[in-house]
């Protein structure tokens, strides 16, 4: 079997120095043929904006170490995970939580403006049902973050409840309001919502299972999406989402059996990541 050399990007990859595999996860990813990742901060539930900033700086330091010690291209994402302000709200109420979250967003935007980070994420809403009042708070914060992303010239990566086309339309409208181009909004943990009437201009980051990837490739011959594992590098929950080498294995397998065109592989593996985060 001949395998084409194509760039392979995992758009949602968590890995931490004290994680299950740490740097070894990136090495396994690369050994399988991976070439770049979006390295996304894991929540640490800080109680102050200063502690949040420190957690971002630790994350970015690890991104830098990955760049130095492997050949992997690394784009870094930092931002307040939606459950972090919710935790603050439990003890201090929503006014304090909103102030905290806005402060965290400001930190993330500043790190992007300084060139240390390349994306505000993962941010958004809880992945489970919450009262309408809480959802409204999240929406306010997300609009705030979208405005910052626009000003900083970086994309924003959304963690939300399960998305359907209507949810994508809702986020597209929020981006329009904030003046952020829709293609700068990445929907993390997305199904194959790649058709124009499904994505509504947002950029789907699709969980790399065959049942998602097959329809995505069929509906989007140009490959207008990116792929991810949401690998979390958690020692107590190994492979809770997907193993760290899933994207390269899947891409190579589908290129070899003809399910993915080489054109699509380049779009998914390099053109969109560079368009999002910078060449
Ligand atoms: Zn994540």
Image: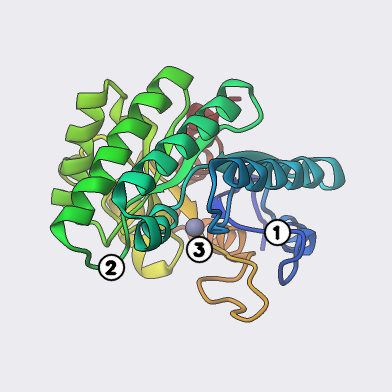
Give the residue at mark 3.
257
Q: Is residue 158 visible?
A: yes
Question: In percent of the image, x 67 and y 44: which residue is there?
Answer: 54
Does 72 appear above or below 155?
Answer: below
Left or right? Give the position of 234 relative to 218.
right
Q: Quadrant of the C terminus?
A: top right
**Tag 2 secondary structure:** loop
Q: Residue furthest bottom?
A: 236
User: Of circles 3 and 2, which is in front?
Assistant: 2
Left or right? Give the position of 61 relative to 175.
right
So how many labels did they put on this image? 3
Cβ atoms under marks 1 and 3 closer than 8 Å: no
The label shown at residue 241 is none
User: Of circles 1 and 3, which is in front?
Assistant: 1
**Closer to the camera, 114 or 227?**
114
Crowding near the residue tagged with mark 1, few <14, some 14–19, many ≥20 C-alpha atoms within 10 Å: many
Question: In percent of the image, x 37 and y 46: which residue is there?
Answer: 96
Q: Residue furthest front?
A: 92
Sequence-wise first label, 2 or 1 = 1
The label shown at residue 128 is 2
**Closer to the camera, 228 or 112?**
112
Left or right? Give the position of 79 relative to 174.
right
Crowding near the residue tagged with mark 3, few <14, some 14–19, many ≥20 C-alpha atoms within 10 Å: few
Measured in 3D between alpha carbons, the distance from the residue under mark 1 to the one under mark 3, in whole angstroms, is 34 Å
Measured in 3D between alpha carbons, the distance from the residue under mark 2 to the one under mark 1, in whole angstroms, is 25 Å
Crowding near the residue tagged with mark 2, few <14, some 14–19, many ≥20 C-alpha atoms within 10 Å: few
Sequence-wise first label, 1 or 3 = 1
Q: Is residue 7 visible?
A: no
Give the residue at mark 1.
16
**Tag 3 secondary structure:** loop
């Amino acid at each position: 079997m001949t395998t084409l050399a194509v760039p392979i990007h995992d758009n949602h990859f968590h890995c931490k120095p004290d994680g299950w595999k740490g740097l070894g996860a990136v090495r396994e990813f690369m050994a399988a043929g991976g070439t770049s990742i979006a390295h996304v901060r894991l929540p640490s539930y800080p109680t102050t904006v200063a502690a949040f900033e420190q957690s971002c700086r630790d994350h970015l330091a690890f991104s830098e170490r990955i760049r130095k010690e492997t050949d992997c291209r690394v784009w870094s994402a930092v931002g307040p995970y939606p459950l972090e302000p919710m935790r603050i709200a439990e003890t201090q109420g929503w006014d304090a939580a909103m102030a905290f979250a806005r402060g965290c967003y400001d930190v993330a935007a500043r790190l992007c403006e300084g060139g240390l980070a390349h994306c505000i994420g993962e941010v958004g809403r809880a992945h489970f049902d919450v009262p309408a009042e809480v959802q409204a708070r999240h929406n306010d914060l997300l609009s705030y973050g979208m405005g910052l992303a626009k000003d900083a010239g970086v994309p924003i990566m959304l963690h939300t409840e399960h998305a359907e086309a209507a949810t994508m339309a809702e986020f597209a409208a929020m981006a329009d309001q904030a003046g952020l181009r829709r293609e700068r909004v990445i929907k993390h943990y997305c199904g194959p919502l790649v058709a124009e009437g499904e994505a509504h201009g947002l950029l789907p980051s699709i969980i790399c299972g065959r049942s998602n990837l097959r329809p995505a490739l069929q509906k989007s011959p140009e490959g207008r999406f990116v792929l991810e594992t949401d690998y979390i590098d958690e020692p107590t929950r190994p492979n809770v989402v997907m193993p760290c080498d899933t994207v390269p294995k899947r891409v190579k397998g589908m290129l070899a059996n003809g399910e993915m065109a080489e054109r699509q592989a380049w779009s998914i593996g390099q053109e969109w990541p560079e368009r999002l985060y910078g060449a």
